[in-house]
Image (spheres, rainbow, N blue to C red):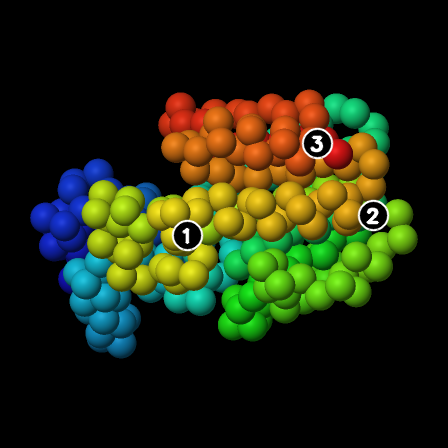
Amino acid sequence: MTYNELWHLLAPLYGDSEAKAIARMVYDVRFGLSLSDICIGKDTQLSANCQAELKGIADRLLEQEPVQYVLGQTDFCGRTFRVNKHVLIPRPETGELCHWIVSQGDCSLMNATNILDIGTGSGCIAITLAAEMRKAKVTAWDISENALEVARENARRLNVNVTFEQVDVLHIPSNSYQQTSKGFDVIVSNPPYIINKERASMETNVLNYEPHTALFVPDDDPLLFYRAIAAYGQNALRQGGWLYFEINPLYAQNMIELLSSMSYHDIETRYDEYGKQRMIRAQK
């Protein structure tokens, strides 16, 4: 199977542009062939074993399994992260949240020493912050031990120091408040925020393959995780510390009202590259 044959096979499902991007990713990541290599015909010279592997990849892609899971990796904030069915695939908008934290100009935040990432998944937020803010002590929680295994492996591969712990944010142990005597400088989270009634408009490759526990919240309580994290922050953040969240744009105003009602101030939202109100921060 050549590059042209692969993307034409995928095009009815993904459209021409996405099919070409997926095919390029497959040849690059799995077989080490660049677009230039493909242009001079190296995709026609794959061994029989490689051709058999390519057919297996194509079969999985035709089942609409995300290419990141098929290949076992994805790029995020300039680094390559391992991913599998136990973790969400990191999105560009989550990268924007990391950039927002890292790019803040005030010295107290840039020199932050204690950061907590809640619901870490692949570890993409925690690891990015640890890599970009080398003075920081970064802790990351997730309810899933399978997800934490992925995150730990990513931290090892990318040579950053993050403390990973299995914690259910809806049932936080009382001793977690004593993890740092001065409190956290930053608590950041990209928690589940998609309500169940939004399922109908979602892509099959997300619904069928990405972990639902990391995606969905009840229709009658869309701010469930935000409320729990903000309540924890009231005790665990140092005075002047910051909460950062990725949010559902449908509930941006509700988030502002929630944080304000809990005595957070300097509340600010930001739009992602797609023009959606996707991020919020607030100060204790």
Residue 106, image x, y percentages: 79, 25
Q: Is residue 52 left or right of residue 262?
A: left
Residue 249, image x, y percentages: 42, 32
The quadrant in which the N terminus is found is bottom left
According to the picture, the residue beneath numbered tag 1 turns out to be 217
How many angstroms separate mark 1 from mark 2 (CA)?
A: 28 Å
Which badge, 1 or 2, comes first in the chain's sequence? 2
Which badge, 2 or 3, comes first in the chain's sequence? 2
**Image quadrant where residue 141 sits:** bottom right
According to the picture, the residue beneath numbered tag 2 turns out to be 183
Q: Is residue 250 left or right of residue 20?
A: right
Query: In the displayed structure, would residue 131 be above or below residue 263?
Result: below
Residue 110 visible to an observer of this rendering: no
Which badge, 3 or 1, comes first in the chain's sequence? 1
Instruction: Say what amino acid the circle numbered 3 marks.
Output: Ser
**Mark 1: few, some, or many residues within 10 Å (few <14, many ≥20)?**
many
**Image quadrant where residue 36 sits:** top left
Q: Is residue 171 left or right of residue 68?
A: right
Quick check: marks 3 and 1 in contact, CB under 8 Å? no
**Disc nearest the viewer among 3 and 1:** 3
| Relative depth, front residue between 262 and 181 | 262
**Mark 3: few, some, or many residues within 10 Å (few <14, many ≥20)?**
few
The quadrant in which the C terminus is found is top right
| Residue displayed at 71% across by 45% down | 233
